[in-house]
Image (spheres, rainbow, N blue to C red):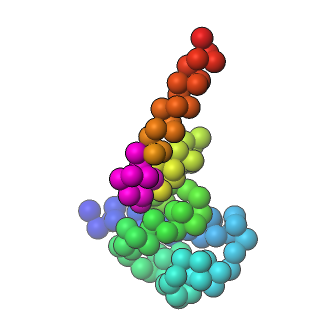
Amino acid sequence: MLLANFEGVMSLAAKLSKERLRKGQSLQEVADDIGVSKTHIWQLEKGRSVNPSLDLITKLANHYDVSIRFLVGEDMEQNDDEDLIKMFRQVGQLDENDRFLIDQMVQSLLARKEKNDA
């Protein structure tokens, strides 16, 4: 069990490093954007920091425009649904009235699509 957790941390570390390099950012830039220390980002990328908080993982996923599932290894690779996963996560942070408004907008768009498809 401990080995599985270690492999998961390493997978997260490799993904964080890869995503940072993909964006062409320094450790300090990511740290500033996320609101943590440069050392903490370095520790995460090296697999030396275990069990990061869900809040931190969420901030990193949003920063890198990937899903939490991708970062923590539940997805073996990114797929076309990354944007949907990100939108769903962001909508979850809204209050009930805003969620209702978004639901109404989606229903309207679906009705328009159905009408156009007919």
Q: Is residue 20 visible?
A: yes
Q: Which residue is drawn at 37% across and 67% down?
A: 54
Front position in the image: 96 or 53: 96
Q: Magenta span covers which residues?
A: 91-100
Q: Which residue is drawn at 26% across and 62% down?
A: 1
Residue 98 percent across, percent down from the top left: 43, 52
Q: Which residue is drawn at 58% across and 17% down?
A: 115
| Residue 93 painted magenta | yes
Residue that protrudes farthest toward the left in the picture: 1
In what quadrant of the picture does the C terminus appear? top right
Residue that protrudes farthest toward the top in the picture: 118
Q: Is residue 58 left or right of residue 22?
A: left
Q: Residue at x 53, y 24 (%)?
A: 111
Residue that protrudes farthest toward the right in the picture: 24
Please, is residue 51 above or below residue 15 in the view? below
Front position in the image: 46 or 90: 90
Q: Is residue 7 visible?
A: no
